Amino acid sequence: MIKKTLTTLLMLCGTAFGLMSYKAYPPPQIRTIVIDPGHGGFDPGTHGLISKEKDIALAISLKLGRALQQAFPGIKIVYTRTTDIMPGNKPTVPDGIRYRAELANRANGDLFICIHCNSNAHPAGSYPVKHLVRYRTTGRGRHKKTVPVYATSWVKNTTHGTTTYIWKADRNGSKSDAINLRDQLRNGENMGDSTGEAFDMDSPEAMMRAQLYEKKYFANSALFGTLVEKEFATTGRHSFGVEQRQIGIGVLEATGMPSVLIETGYLTNREEERYLASSKGQTEVAANILRAFRRYQDKLRANSPN
Ligand SMILES: [Zn+2]
């Protein structure tokens, strides 16, 4: 009980300390960006009429990486995959997610960008909908009855637009663990062996530190996501904005850095799929994210006292 109180007290002090030195956490220089094309290999993701999500996510990711590299030659770009494989050639999706996160943590990433495409519950393009037109009477006498008459019409799948996801704030505990894990990996590597003093992930100091980073990372992820969505909107895309999601974004919680998952559009919408499947569309999406990154970096620098 006493230990618990002490821990709480330390955490409160830590928060106060964190607020004082908030701007200094973490340093604003971005050295490494990890780009994660969603799905891959045996996991195609969703699909439209002419394309699969895994292929479009990869094409956009590679264009984004090249654009970032060109604009910022000093920044290291790390991809979780550059071909049509499940990252690390892992046999299952959860193994792939673990691999993606571990790669990002080991690379000591400063920003994690996950690229995906969306779909809704309806088939791609258009789909048949049966609707009641009228009733007709059949039979005679006591066999006479009224039966409904249906017609089928084709309905266009109209849902379209972009959404950037960040992890849900109430799931911050697992983000803290990821931050500690990343530090542990980094410390282990810096010391060059495994016999060095272990970083105690359960220590109050480690927890406080992780929580400070976590708050900053959450704010930075929300900031970057907002800028990405704004850039999409400026090129005439429909933006659903930044959302917090709990399901299917485990990779965002498992990476000890600001992380976003960008749903670049709906493959189930015919026009949006054509756009995303085209080289022009993919280049534009990559350019949108690049511009958002430029603004993000400017804002980080402006907020930094250094
Ligand atoms: Zn996806």
Image (tube, rainbow, N blue to C red):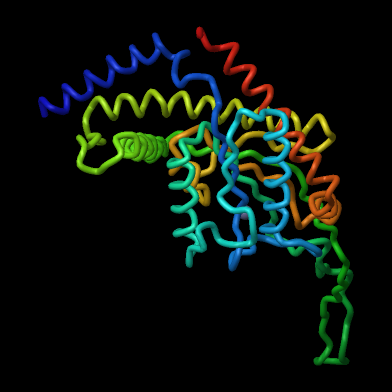
Q: Is residue 205 left or right of residue 173?
A: left
Residue 14 drawn above or below residue 198: above
Residue 106 drawn above or below residue 155: above
Residue in the image at 30% along x and 17% along y: 14
Where does the image place residue 263, in percent across and percent down from the top left?
Answer: 67, 45
- Determine which quarter of the picture holds residue 127: bottom right
Where does the image place residue 208, in percent across and percent down from the top left?
Answer: 30, 24
Give the farthest residue toward the front.
192
In the rendered picture of this protein, how many numbered marks are placed on residues? 0
Where does the image place residue 3, in percent across and percent down from the top left?
Answer: 12, 27
Residue in the image at 11% along x and 29% along y: 1
Q: Is residue 150 left or right of residue 94?
A: right
Q: Is residue 49 left or right of residue 240?
A: right
Ligand 1 visible in quadrant: bottom right
Residue in the image at 62% along x and 32% along y: 225
- Determine which quarter of the picture holds residue 229: top right
Q: In this view of the protein, which residue sits in the foreground, 19 or 63? A: 63
Does the image show residue 194?
A: yes
Q: In this view of the protein, which residue sits in the foreground, 217 or 118? A: 217
Give the farthest residue toward the left.
2
Residue in the image at 60% along x and 39% along y: 77
Does the image show residue 173?
A: no
Residue 268 drawn above or below residue 66: below
Where does the image place residue 223, in percent across and percent down from the top left?
Answer: 60, 25
